[in-house]
Amino acid sequence: MILHELRRQIRLPLSPEKVFEWHSRKDALLRLSPPWAMPVHLRQQSGLKTGGQVSMRIPLGPLSLPWKGYYPEVSAPFFFKDIQTKGPFAFWEHSHYFHPDAAGCRMEDILRFALPAGPAGNFFAAKMVKEKLEKLFHWRQHVLEDDLSAPLPRPMTILMSGSSGLVAESLIPALTTAGHRVIPLVRQRGISGTRFWNPEKGCADPDIMDGVDAVLHLGGEPIGEDTWTEEKKRRILQSRIQGTRFLVQAIKKASHPPKILISASAIGYYGHRKDSVLSEADSSGQGFLARVCRMWEEEALQAQDFCRVVCLRIGIGLTPRGGALARLYPLFSMGLGGTIGRGRAWMSWIAMEDLVRAIRFLLHAEEISGPVNLTAPQPLQARAFADTLGSTLKRPSGMQLPPSLLHLCLGEMGKEVLMSSTRAYPFKLEAAGFRFRYPDLKSALPMLTGKG
């Protein structure tokens, strides 16, 4: 058996106790996983303690493989080790050290592993596996630098709608590892750790706002999954208006209202605006999406006499886990990437990691209220976006889809979602000192896809 070894270290300005505590939180493994290697069906027994067990499935292209392991040795707050008992490696031993130093903590990872199939496995797969593990460690280093570069904020209790959605999948681990408690709003009564609501029927748990410091409202009928029949458009609008109105009324009735309501919106608020650079002060545009976002924000702002209100004008959130990038990735991987028409429409995108970090930042940025553009500071026209994605995947990206064909197939949805030009800029976030981890697409895509 041929053993390989990887060593990495990072210095953090917190004590070993604080850094170890962060790693012991139940969502730490999810927080440390890059979007292209996010485990599914993760189960942990006994937590980060000697004998604690972990099981999950890890992605491998379109498939997933079972992985089981345990912690044979945990010595808080200075050391823990995990070992694979079942999985794709012939051997896996990962040691984590937390050394005190003058600056706080020097964290050291030592990973020893062996591949299956002996010499043949090493000949065919060793280089690829090492490259993937290097990228995984690089991602983890970015997360630790962002999450542990300063004292952790005061813990909050956060009530969240849309907790099973794409944004929440990444957001919840980022919040819980920071010490916050997240209470999902669900449609079924009696589920431990959740609170019940049904805005369509106007009913909810009577204690829905008890002890809540912040409300994150991310729920709503998906916009880009089906063509827009009149019934679909009704659900898109009503799910947002009813849910927001219900939460605002609950905030108004609360004896101790939360300090902040963060409600989702979208850059669809601006409509098709060609080359205009759009700030949060710009007016709403034309079209169905603009009307939905305008009415959505108006409902949320009804709570501003009771708490701080932030409306998230979210751009094109990029993650291989879903949304635009998940749809584009297989086409570009097959060399079928391109644009609609000449590709002149502006795409205001944001890496999911920066979207999550921005929401976490806004929870504590008391000077910010009202609409906030959640977009990267370097939007691109569609042709440049396609070329950058094609270059990252090392595939051609020169195809052009006639706009008339798209409109014929997808109708109003295709025109507003896929063909609108919106060049939004995150003026408020930048003015408040928020630092984007991925300000440009060229740096974002390799981290999002594990390629390049």
Image (tube, rainbow, N blue to C red):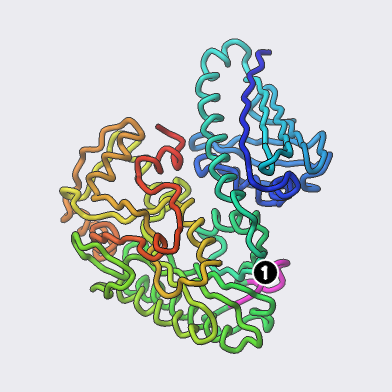
Name the residue located 60 percent from the left edge and 78 percent from the top edge: 258
List x then y, in percent, for residue 119.
60, 10
Identify the residue under disc 1. Answer: 194
- Circle 1 residues within 10 Å: few <14, some 14–19, many ≥20: some
Q: Vertically, is 215 above or below 54?
A: below
Say whether residue 370 is magenta.
no
Name the residue located 69 percent from the left edge and 76 percent from the top edge: 211
Q: Quadrant of residue 393?
A: top left
Magenta stretch: dominant secondary structure: loop
Q: Vertically, is 103 above or below 115?
A: below
Q: How many marks can you see?
A: 1
Q: Going by the picture, which residue comes out furthest to the front?
A: 102
* Amino acid on which the number 1 mark rests in the picture: Thr
Q: In the shown orientation, is residue 129 left or right of residue 50?
A: left
Classify the position of the C terminus by image quarter: top left
List x then y, in percent, for residue 223.
38, 64
Q: Vertically, is 75 above or below 115?
A: below
Q: Which residues are magenta?
A: 188-197
List x then y, in percent, for residue 265.
40, 69
Classify the position of the N terminus by image quarter: top right
Q: In the shown orientation, is residue 250 left or right of residue 382?
A: right
